[in-house]
Image (cartoon, rainbow, N blue to C red):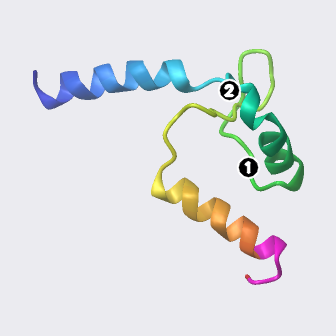
Amino acid sequence: MDLNRFTELMNEYRTTLRDNDAGDWSKESRQWAISTGLVKGSGTLPNGEPNYMWEDMPTRETLVEMMYRLAKMMGQA
């Protein structure tokens, strides 16, 4: 398998994670993160809802953005 094929397969796999499916155990935390603006999602789903991609892997860039938003909420940025 070459790099291009691996990338193609990985992108197909990650596409299955890019929806708003998530476990009930995190519902309260997810609602809080959305309501405070800590999490904004990435794009929209076909039905027009924000796509939070709860099961997808966060990147360092995404984590830094959320940390920055939290710091701003706390008056530290």
Residue found at the very far left of the displayed protein: 1
Residue 52 vs 59, above or below: the answer is above
Q: Which mark is in front, 2 or 1?
A: 2
Q: In which quarter of the image is residue 70?
A: bottom right
Q: What stretch is highlighted in magenta?
A: 72-76
Q: Where is residue 8 in the image (x, y as percent from the top left)?
A: 30, 22
- Left or right of 39, for residue 75: right
Q: Disc 2 versus disc 1: distance between alpha carbons? A: 14 Å
* Badge 1: residue crowd in 10 Å (few <14, some 14–19, many ≥20): some
- Helix, strand or loop for disc 1: loop
Residue 59 vs 30, above or below: the answer is below
Q: Position of residue 11 (x, y in %)?
A: 38, 25
Is most of the magenta stretch helix, strand or loop?
loop
Q: What residue lies at 70% left-to-right and 31% top-to-bottom? A: 51
Q: At label 2, which amino acid type do we have?
A: Ala
Q: What residue lies at 67% left-to-right and 70% top-to-bottom? A: 68
Disc number placed over residue 12 in the picture, else none: none
Disc number placed over residue 22 in the picture, else none: 2
Residue 31 in magenta stretch: no
Q: What residue lies at 72% left-to-right and 28% top-to-bottom? A: 44
- Helix, strand or loop for disc 2: loop
In which quadrant will I find the N terminus? top left
Q: Nearer the viewer, residue 56 or 45?
A: 56
Q: Position of residue 65 (x, y in %)?
A: 62, 62
Residue 22 vs 68, above or below: the answer is above
- Left or right of 48, for residue 63: left
In which quadrant will I find the C terminus? bottom right
Residue at numbered disc 1: 39
- Mark positioned earlier in the residue sequence (2 or 1): 2
Q: Quadrant of residue 7?
A: top left
